[in-house]
């Protein structure tokens, strides 16, 4: 099994849920920048207070901030990892590439979780996170299209991108992901 993975996809694609399942099964470190930021918010750190303002508007927090959070974790040299919600734009992807080259641990596979737009809105509205109101969701989807969606081309050019249709239920999507991973052994 590949040990250094990245989940790419719009908000509501199920990245967090599927990352959780896969990481438990394969003993990978689940590195979710959204989760790390929410932990800061919950702990009411000054970083968390600043980040909450940005997150609740559906904007992206600063590249430097998320990069240093990811760098700190990767510097602990985990055996295997799955990045979820990072990188979110080309600058982050380029910085990540430099960082991973430095530690000689390139990404082995990027899985793009592909979901139709109507379903995304439906799933996000059902989730009920503080940043899941309809206006904020629509804005997050715009930010995704403008800044994050270009990363599918970025990784496709590097020949490490695979697409998984992710509009079924949790189990079905899990099976599709495992199928792709098993084919890539
Ligand atoms: P997520 O849990 O991935 O949906 O992230 C929730 C929110 O955290 C996003 O809407 C952003 O405000 C912020 N966030 C998470 N990851 C990143 C990232 N890599 N770069 C910038 N902001 C992020």
Image (cartoon, rainbow, N blue to C red):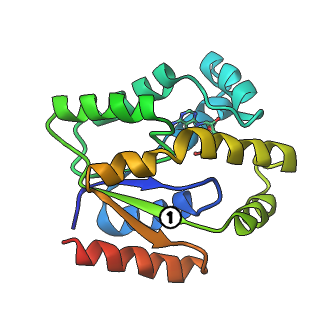
Residue lying at 70% horizontally and 22% vertically, measured from the top left: 49
Residue lying at 69% horizontally and 48% vertically, measured from the top left: 141
x and y, in percent, of residue 104 in the image:
14, 37
- In the figure, is residue 51 to the left or right of 112? right
Which residue bears the numbered disc 1?
113
Name the residue nearer the viewer: 152 or 15.
152
Does 130 appear above or below 49?
below
- In the figure, is residue 139 to the left or right of 19? right
x and y, in percent, of residue 86 in the image:
46, 41
Residue lying at 41% horizontally and 23% vertically, measured from the top left: 68
Would you call the spot at circle 1 few (<14 residues within 10 Å), some (14-19), or many (20 or more)? many
Residue lying at 76% horizontally and 34% vertically, measured from the top left: 56
Regarding residue 168, the answer to whether it shows in the image is yes
x and y, in percent, of residue 176 in the image:
43, 79
Which of the image's four quarters has the C terminus?
bottom left
Q: Secondary structure at mark 1?
A: strand
- In the figure, is residue 143 to the left or right of 82? right
Regarding residue 31, the answer to whether it shows in the image is no
User: Regarding ligand 1, which quadrant of the image does it lie in?
Assistant: top right
| Numbered label tally | 1
């Amino acid at each position: 099994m590949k040990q250094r993975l990245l989940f790419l996809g719009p908000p509501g694609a199920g990245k967090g849920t599927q990352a959780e399942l896969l990481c438990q099964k394969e003993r990978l470190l689940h590195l979710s920048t959204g989760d790390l930021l929410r932990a800061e918010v919950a702990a009411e750190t000054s970083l968390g207070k600043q980040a909450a303002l940005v997150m609740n508007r559906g904007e992206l927090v600063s590249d430097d901030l998320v990069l240093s959070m990811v760098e700190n974790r990767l510097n602990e040299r985990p055996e295997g990892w799955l990045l979820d919600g990072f990188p979110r734009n080309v600058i982050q992807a380029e910085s990540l590439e430099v960082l991973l080259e430095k530690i000689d641990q390139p990404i082995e596979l990027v899985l793009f979780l592909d979901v139709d737009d109507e379903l995304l809105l439906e799933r996000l509205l059902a989730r009920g996170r503080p940043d899941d109101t309809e206006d904020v969701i629509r804005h997050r989807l715009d930010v995704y299209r403008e800044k994050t969606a270009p990363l599918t081309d970025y990784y496709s050019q590097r020949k490490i991108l695979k697409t998984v249709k992710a509009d079924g239920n949790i189990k079905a999507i899990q099976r599709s992901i495992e199928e792709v991973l098993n084919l890539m052994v």
